[in-house]
Amino acid sequence: MTDQSVPTPDARAASAARLPTDTELLSTLAELGREVTSVLAIEELLAKIPVLIARLTRFSAFSVYLLDEKAQVLNDAGQPIAGLLAAGATTGGLEGGSHAGYSGGLSKASVFGIIAAETLAASLALQD
């Protein structure tokens, strides 16, 4: 990606005149995935996320949650926040599209729901 600036409202309005095809969206998502996974410094990644998301959709606000492999939400130091687990759409991704429905959120709810439940069960077992 050569342009690191966030698109202006005028630029977004002009690009909204023609909606991208499903093929264009998938291609852009694949490219964004490659870019995101190539960034190792968290500060660089967090600065890049709004630029990448703006390539796909308009937004006025969004949140970024960092998770570990146990579905625990991490604080700024990368440590788990006690008792705070994530599942479903909270775990990330872009939902929607012309034919998507809510399948993405349901799969994330299932997968991360199980992981979060296992993490909680293990935590409760340690307290006994």
Image: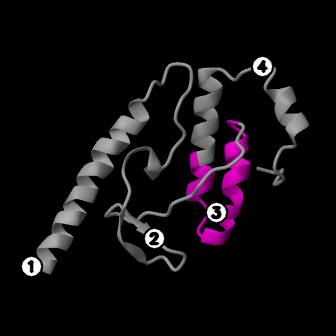
Residue 13 image offset from top left, x and y in percent: 84, 30
Other residues around mark 1 within 10 Å, as few (<14) / some (14–19) / many (≥20) = few
- What residue is disc 3 on? 45
Residue 12 image offset from top left, x and y in percent: 82, 34
Residue 110 image offset from top left, x and y in percent: 28, 42
Q: Secondary structure at mark 4?
A: loop
Residue 87 lies in magenta, yes or no? no
- What residue is disc 4 on? 18
Whether residue 45 appears in this view of the structure is yes
> Which comes before the other along the chain, label 2 or label 4?
4
Task: Specify the label residue 128 is tagged with.
Answer: 1
Looking at the image, the residue that sits furthest to the right is: 10
- Residue 51 versus residue 33: which sits nearer the camera? 51
Three-letter residue code for mark 2? Leu
Specify the segment rendered in magenta.
Answer: 33-57
Taken as a whole, is the magenta stretch helix, strand or loop? helix
Tell me: 118 left or right of 77.
Answer: left
Colour mapping: one colour
Which residue: 60% across, 69% down? 42
